[in-house]
Amino acid sequence: MVTTSCGMCYGTCTVNVRVEDGVVVGIEGVPDSPQGYGNICAKGLSSLMMLYDPSRLNYPLLRTNPEKGIGVDPGWKRISWNEAMDLLTSKLGECLKKDPRGLYTVGSPTFPAERAFNVLCFRKAFGTPNYYTGGGGLHCGNGAHMIGGIYHASWSVIPDFKYCNMAIYWGCSKGHGAGHAANVAAKQAADAKARGMRLIVFDPFLSTQASTAEEWVPIKAGTDAAAALAMANLLLSEYSAYDKEYIKWKTNGPYLVAPDGLYRRDKKSGVPLVWNIIDKKVEPFNSENVKDCALEGEFDVDGTKCTPSFQLLRNHLKKYTPEHASEICGVSASTLRRIAKDFGEEARIGSTISIDGKTLPYRPVASIYFRGSQGHYNQAWDCMSLVLLNHLVGSADVPGGALAFGPPVHLGYPGTGRLKYSVEPDKDGLLVAKNWPYAHLPYPPPEPKDPPERLDLQDMFYIPTYTTIMAWDNNEELWQKFKIPYRPDVMISFATNQIMSVGNPKTLMKNFLQKFGFIASFNIYSTEFEESAADLVLPDACYLERYSSATTFPTVGVSCHGTGLGEWIWAIRQPVIKPMYERRPMIDVILELSERLGLRDRYIEAAREWVNRAYGGDLDFKKVLDPKEKLNFERMLDIIMKDRFGPDKGLDYFKEHGYLKWDKRVEEVYWRAFNDVRVPVYLEWIIRAGRKSRAIAEKYGVPDLVDWSAHNALPEWRPCPTHTEKNPEYDLEAFYWRSALHTYSMTMQNPWLNEVSQNDPYTYTIQLNTETANRKGVKEGDLVWLENSKGSKAKGRVHITDGIRPDHVAIAANAGHWSKGMPIAKDKGVFFNELIEIDKEHTCPVSLGQDICVKVKLYKDGGDRSG
């Protein structure tokens, strides 16, 4: 029996793998592990079918057909590893000599620790700024993670299931079989429901979470912000259900704002000013003299009338009446009023609770969001609107409220004091995350580059982690105008299928992938991406054949440690059998490439930076590794673990035990009460940062790069292209959802999961409302087309249900494979992403994430296209 961490999604449950005579015969949960509590899902159980899949890549393959494109036969030719390494070293060496920025690196978010060492560290060592995750980040990351980082120093939020009494879900599935730390959250959610927690789900589709909720609210897709802002308005102006003390001392609500929209600052210290109610004068917000401060009113500061930001928010929200929001979102005004009132009352503002001798605010309500609510044109402000509800009633990172994943504060492993990280305020008192897995923090904003250096122009903005600009039709024009001196040259991809995960594959291929001179992909299958675009395919080891440093840390990343009171866990991933055939873990290849290219020391430095940022501490590999010592991943893991946990708990300890656990502290889980940090109810810094980015765009002759009017300080609802479509022929709003049976596009090839999916009426079909089906003459099982206004189409069989709005149509994501290298997955399900356009019109102007809903017409296969 070998203990390791499941790698079939980013839930990373601890598993015991039974091996007999060198053959894996079973996989089961580990009851003692807090990462799963002994439970694993169908994906984990089925992973031995992936291990032994005869369609797996086993040898390096070289493309012999010079033509690339969707459906083009690559003409694979088997080559040796020596040939593959010589070719890859040569191509990378040429790129390094010409301009290292020509290297584009891509890595799957399913394996965050592996991605860090395989891709992020190598990218840094090589000297390229260019990186993305494919659709994984563009569809669910930019808006949700940005807001999670700004308001909770975390990737996302989840209810404090132990104490929460009322949770509102907006397009998310926390605790219902999908998403982060899935099995941990599922147990916690089930226990909360048994205890009596009330769940209300806003979703156009009767999803798994909606089907188990006390109330399903079938809202129009992309309108969550309108509903939430109306509820916020009711809390402030009609029900007076807001936590004044929290807003005074834990937000920037009292900061005085001048007519230009910016803070009025102290002339000496430069920090924002507040109005001292007791002394009746302005003072720096952090002055010890300020015992009480104003949230409302108008105050004279050196002859200028200034207003507290909370007052500006309150005034701004008044236009979002329940009646107005109802017209937008399709939810009755009375429903919005009732839910807002219940939320405010159940928040129990002013109440406290004692836990382990600590008296804490008790706010047992949570407003929770994720990909479904953020996959829209207005995603940055959509997510801010949803999280704002928590901060108005003070239910952020306190018992019963909305908790940061992880959480983002760890006071150190008890035996060593290492693995320590926390949060801190910046000079304006606002929350800064210190444990963050990506290149720039969500706040404070990085200084935009002039001119930008990245091909996706991400570095001239202040919020996005990724953008799709590198695949827009006018990308070459933009690169020329911004004087970017290099072009795409070499791509290295780890475990991604960009062709299926980003958007319209023809657009991505034509505008982006075909511009590369050489593409190398590490994967376990020859997917649509390899067949369409790759020149060299290298057979990666799957999770049962390789090591990973830590599958549950960093806590705020997509590795997704379980949240709430309980135990911390550091778990590793280790090979349960040796890689079969000629499969090799990508990290072994990357370390060899680093040596071959003369990047050894730069790789070590990049790994040091990432480890210290992600795991806390000041580890220096150079002090431990001999300068002549060949890079070895097991050796690096041993150094990391001994540094964090002590000399007796190196890699050998974790090989034997699989994980290490210890108790969480109240100060870590409910960290906000113990840290003097604030969050913005008024995002003044977005005005300042937006002006800088806009000035760069105007300087280089691209004044309309994005809609700069969205770069303001207060949340608002803005329509998506689906809401402004004028042609009545396109009468259905199409969106996709995540099936708990699958992870991205990687699991449809698994025969067990495929069988379950075929027996499920939803996973491989198009969900259409009964009323709509009758109106269009469509019957159960009919083969139909969905077509958008640009002529892009997707085909699938219909499942008729009352569990979806009549004006919407839903599809489970990332099915519909056509690759010959995935014969079981081939022709199963619907390829929704064919309908997603990759352009400015479908890009959030603030976060630069993708709008992934689309207006379509529906017609039978071979029938009248007018629908």
Image: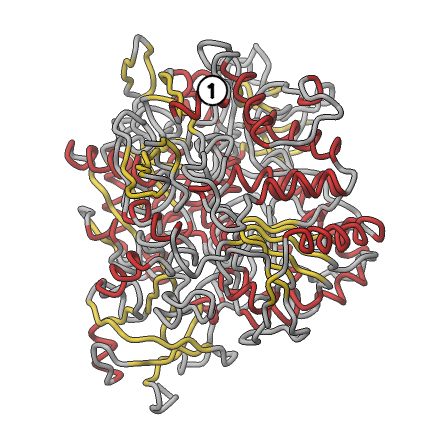
| Residue 170: percent from left, percent from top | 34, 49
| Residue 441: percent from left, percent from top | 60, 35
Q: Residue at x 65, y 44 (%)?
A: 462
Q: Is residue 347 visible?
A: yes
- 333 or 29: nearer the viewer: 29
Screen quadrant of the C terminus: bottom left
Screen quadrant of the N terminus: top left
Q: Residue at x 46, y 42 (%)?
A: 545
Q: Which residue is mark 1?
A: 410
**How is the model colour-coded?**
secondary structure
| Residue 182: percent from left, percent from top | 33, 41
Q: Tell me: residue 741, above or below residue 604.
A: below
- 30 or 835: nearer the viewer: 30
Q: Quadrant of residue 77?
A: bottom right
| Residue 667: percent from left, percent from top | 41, 16
Q: Amino acid at mark 1?
A: His
Q: Is residue 296 visible?
A: no
Q: Residue at x 71, y 57 (%)?
A: 490
